[in-house]
């Protein structure tokens, strides 16, 4: 286990933006420090598979035919910036959070940032691209984060049972129809227990605000520049 790096991720200031760096620069700086070579992996995927909105490609297969895997995007565009994840996690009441699930987790960044603010909690990220799962899990193992895991899973499959958690994170990874499928399942969970939903991206934020009063009626959502944190209880 890399104890130096493990101590590094336990300090919240290490996930704040430094000096005048941009979110993308921060992402690249921290990914290099963590030796998470998402750049090369994304390049490799882009050379093999049809890219994001590359509709007219005749030579390359889509990585998955029924869902958008965002191949061809820069890794810093694909993922939520570290500092934004910190802001979202800090808005949660720590005493209520034992488990966080990321639905479409890429390399599992949320699990890393959690170590600084919610070290008691466990994390499970579900991700359809197995190559991303393997790289992210290798980093969790290197850091000895036994309470963090990434699983290869298509979360849109009818037989995927959403795991029990206190907070669910979801980046707007697909069009409204598919995002509704996910939000309907979260709504069913919210009818049974208190949960937080951390959402990023304008599409999903509008969808929740317009069509899922269960997540807005009882508690005022908290909004950041591109994210919102919702709950179904006061
Ligand atoms: C925009 S990225 C967000 C990654 C991460 N949650 C973050 O915010 O940093 C969305 C991820 O969802 C994954 N994804 C898309 N459709 C999926 C599906 N049906 N099941 C599981 N993962 C999916 C994509 O492959 C991609 O890695």
Image (cartoon, rainbow, N blue to C red):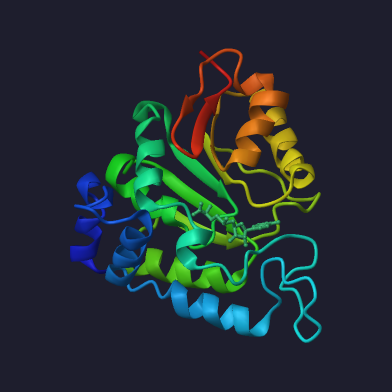
Residue 147 placement (x, y as % from top left): 41, 52
Residue 41 higher or lower than 171, as above or below: below
Left or right relative to 93: residue 162: right
Q: Quadrant of residue 201?
A: top right
Residue 16 placement (x, y as % from top left): 26, 47
Left or right relative to 229: residue 7: left
Judge by depth and name the residue closer to the eye, 21 or 191.
21
Q: Is residue 14 visible?
A: yes
Q: Quadrant of the N terminus?
A: bottom left
Task: Give the residue drawn at x 35%, y 43%.
Answer: 86
* Total tally of numbered discs in the picture: 0
Q: Is residue 144 visible?
A: no
Residue 73 higher or lower than 232, as above or below: below
Residue 221 placement (x, y as % from top left): 51, 23
Residue 124 placement (x, y as % from top left): 51, 51
Residue 164 higher or lower than 148, as above or below: above
Task: Give the residue drawn at x 80%, y 75%.
Answer: 56
Judge by depth and name the residue closer to the eye, 157 or 75.
75
Task: Give the residue drawn at x 81%, y 49%.
Answer: 158
Task: Give the residue drawn at x 31%, y 44%.
Answer: 119
Judge by depth and name the residue closer to the eye, 24 or 8.
24
Ligand 1 falls in which quarter?
A: bottom right
């Amino acid at each position: 286990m890399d104890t130096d790096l493990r101590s590094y991720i336990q300090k919240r200031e290490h996930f704040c933006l430094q000096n005048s760096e941009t979110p993308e620069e921060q992402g690249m700086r921290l990914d290099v420090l963590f030796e998470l070579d998402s750049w090369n992996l994304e390049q490799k995927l882009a050379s093999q598979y049809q890219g994001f909105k590359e509709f007219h490609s005749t030579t390359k297969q889509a990585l998955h035919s029924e869902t958008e895997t965002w191949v061809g995007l820069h890794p810093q565009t694909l993922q939520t910036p570290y500092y934004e994840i910190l802001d979202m996690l800090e808005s949660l009441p720590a005493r209520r959070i034992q488990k966080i699930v990321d639905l479409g987790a890429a390399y599992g960044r949320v699990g890393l940032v959690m170590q600084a603010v919610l070290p008691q909690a466990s994390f499970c990220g579900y991700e359809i691209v197995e190559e991303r799962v393997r790289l992210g899990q290798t980093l969790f193992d290197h850091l000895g984060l036994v309470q963090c895991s990434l699983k290869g899973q298509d979360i849109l499959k009818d037989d995927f049972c959403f795991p029990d958690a206190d907070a669910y994170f979801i980046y707007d990874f697909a069009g409204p129809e598919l995002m509704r499928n996910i939000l309907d399942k979260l709504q069913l969970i919210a009818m049974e227990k208190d949960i937080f939903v951390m959402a990023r991206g304008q599409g999903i934020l509008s969808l929740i605000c317009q069509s899922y009063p269960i997540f807005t009626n009882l508690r005022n959502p908290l909004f950041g520049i591109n994210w919102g944190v919702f709950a179904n209880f006061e």
